Amino acid sequence: MFQMKRKLKSDIAFDVANFIVLGGFTLMILYPLYFIVIASISDPNQIYAGNVWLWPKSITFDGYRRIFSDNTIWIGYRNSLFYAALAAVISSVLTVMAAYPLSRKDLYGRNAFMMIFVVTLFFNGGIIPTYLLVKNLHMINTIWAVVLPGAVDAFAIIIARTFFQSLPDELREAAAIDGCTNLRYIWSIVVPLSKPIIAVLVLLAVVRQWNGFFDALIYVNDSSLYPLQLILRNILIQNQPSGDMLTDITTLVAQQKVTELIKFGVIIVAALPLLTLYPLLQRYFVKGVMIGSVKG
């Protein structure tokens, strides 16, 4: 017979405190995003007056109409999607190629190699030496200057190496007895068993590339190669929407109001792919990070 376990008053007070604290943190995280959504469809005059804080006021979709009618946004979207997909493939392949050998105990000097990767977590070459390196490799004003400099992350290598170390050695020994080579073992056994950690590597690479604009700001001069985040930076920080968005507005005051509307809308448009992708990969992300962080 099922009997409900009685809770002490201290347990109930602890649960209530947990709900209050976690609810507060959840509200602190979700409200800014919610405010941007309702501000992007509200009249700027209502936002300036402080009337928009819970519901949208004087709903208008003029900001989204101007955003989606501008070719610059679509070019940035196309470039960001291409850079993110290319970075996901390159970063995942290079990380697996670095992490798997480092997980093998029979790799001579693996601790020294690992130390070299760890040093990069604390020190880097600096902006000017990195720029000169990219320039000497003739990657200035190319897509490779955006994708390759940050393709390999030591943090991702450490997570992947720990995951590969959790694979039983008996599996490799059995494959070796059957005549399986190292490359065949990686492709036929390790990779199929590593879907959670590969999903994590893809998600890390996509998020890093999607949110990044600094490499494009330094190495790219051709506006047709700008990622969406660089265009977003020009709108948000430099307050410079594309000329096509404001051509029909004559007064400066009206332009400033519409610019504010465009700012909120562009933030939603830029964040939408990650907000859509993350729930789909979230279970792989949690599983992969936990397995890769703690050796079982």
Image (cartoon, grey):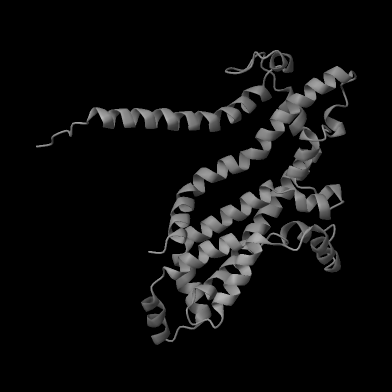
Q: Is residue 104 above or below residue 146?
A: below
| Residue at point 84%, 33% (across, down) | 240
| Horizontal side, residue 75 vs residue 9: left or right | right
Residue 283 relative to residue 149: left or right: left
Residue placed most toward the observer, 67 or 170: 170
Is 72 positioned to the left or the right of 116 in the image? right
> Where is residue 145, by image quadrant?
bottom right
Q: Is residue 241 left or right of residue 23?
A: right
Residue drawn at (53%, 56%), measured in percent from left and top? Answer: 200
In the rendered view, tell whether residue 227 sits above or below residue 296: above
189 up-or-down from 124: above or below? below
Q: Estimate the x, y position of residue 263 in percent, counting from the top left.
A: 74, 30
Across and down, in percent, residue 101 comes to 54, 75
Residue 34: name its quadrant. Answer: top right
Where residue 152 sits: x, y (%)? 65, 63
Q: Is residue 152 visible?
A: no
Count of numbered badges drawn on the protein: 0
The residue that appears at 61% across and 25% down in the rendered structure is: 35
Q: Residue furthest front?
A: 10
